[in-house]
Amino acid sequence: AQSVTQPDIHITVSEGASLELRCNYSYGATPYLFWYVQSPGQGLQLLLKYFSGDTLVQGIKGFEAEFKRSQSSFNLRKPSVHWSDAAEYFCAVGARDADKLIFGTGTRLQVFP
Amino acid sequence: NAGVMQNPRHLVRRRGQEARLRCSPMKGHSHVYWYRQLPEEGLKFMVYLQKENIIDESGMPKERFSAEFPKEGPSILRIQQVVRGDSAAYFCASSPGRAGSNQPQHFGDGTRLSIL
């Protein structure tokens, strides 16, 4: 069955600290992978996407993610977190022959000054 | 604003009433997707439409829910005879081509539906 797992429901970091949000997927086809961020009461903003090629992808707001096929993972990273990064982060998977995205349950990031 | 526009942002209905949620895709986008987000959960796919056609409605409940994307005007998600369990945030996304053809989906700000 197709699924996305975000094992961390809630993460708290200090401003300036590094961040890694985990995402594991189960998908039969070659996946397309996405990270979205959702601020309270807002919609989802695309941070970055992986379709093919270089497995390390750069996104907006200083985020990057690395696709590791052997581990079925697509973890999101940022070297230094800012207070404005506090939000909910969703990993999603799609595919060439699929139209819908399958989302994880999200990781809520809290940033302390 | 060139983004995906959803209205209303908040909608309150009593049990048994109808809810109509509207979505205008980004300019140049002819593919629309509806997702539902229940509290503390991720988004769940409901339906995928192109102009005048429903392509995939595998995530849509069989009863009370319907969607359309007419030739002119926004896409509409319609929920008849709403029940408390329909309370959720409903998000619309659009893309210029099929999502499976390397086209990322761009999301609106959602409609928060509350059922009294």
Image (cartoon, rainbow, N blue to C red):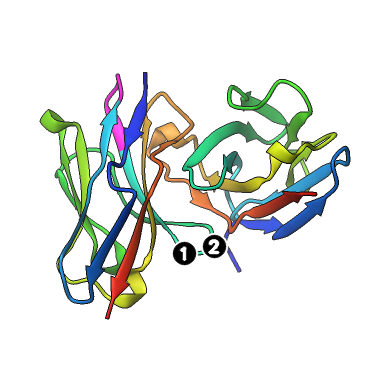
Indicate the amino acid at tag 2.
Gln
Q: CA distance from mark 2 to mark 1?
A: 5 Å
Residue at x-position 30% and y-position 64%: A60
Residue A39 got which mark?
A: 1
Q: Main secondary structure of the magenta part?
A: loop
Quadrant for residue A105, please give it: top left
Quadrant for residue A85, please give it: bottom left
Considering every residue shown, the one lying at the far bottom of the view is: A113
Indicate the amino acid at tag 1.
Ser
Residue at x-position 46% and y-position 36%: B99
First to last magenta residue range: A27-32
Q: Secondary structure at mark 1?
A: loop
Looking at the image, how many numbered discs can be counted on the residues? 2
Could you classify mark 2 by the number of other residues whose Cα lies within 10 Å: few (under 14), some (14-19), or many (20 or more)? some
Instruction: From the top left corner, tell me how far across and down residue B10 is, in percent.
Output: 72, 59
Q: Label 1 lies in what chain? A: A
Q: Is residue A1 above or below residue A44?
A: above
Instruction: From the top left corner, tell me how far across and down residue A101 is, in percent.
Output: 44, 35
- Does residue B7 appear to the left or right of B36 in the view shown? right
- Figure quadrant of the C terminus of chain A: bottom left
Instruction: From the top left corner, tell me how far across and down residue B98 is, in percent.
Output: 49, 34
Residue at x-position 75% and y-position 48%: B21
Residue at x-position 31% and y-position 42%: A6
Which residue is label 2 attached to?
A42
- Does residue A79 appear to the left or right of A106 in the view shown? left
Mark 2 in CB contact with mark 1 (< 8 angstroms): yes
Please name whichever residue, B98 or B11, is drawn nearer the observer in this view of the structure.
B11
Please name whichever residue, B110 or A95, is drawn nearer the observer in this view of the structure.
B110
- Figure quadrant of the N terminus of chain A: top left
Q: Is residue B60 above or below residue B24?
A: above
Q: Label 2 lies in what chain? A: A
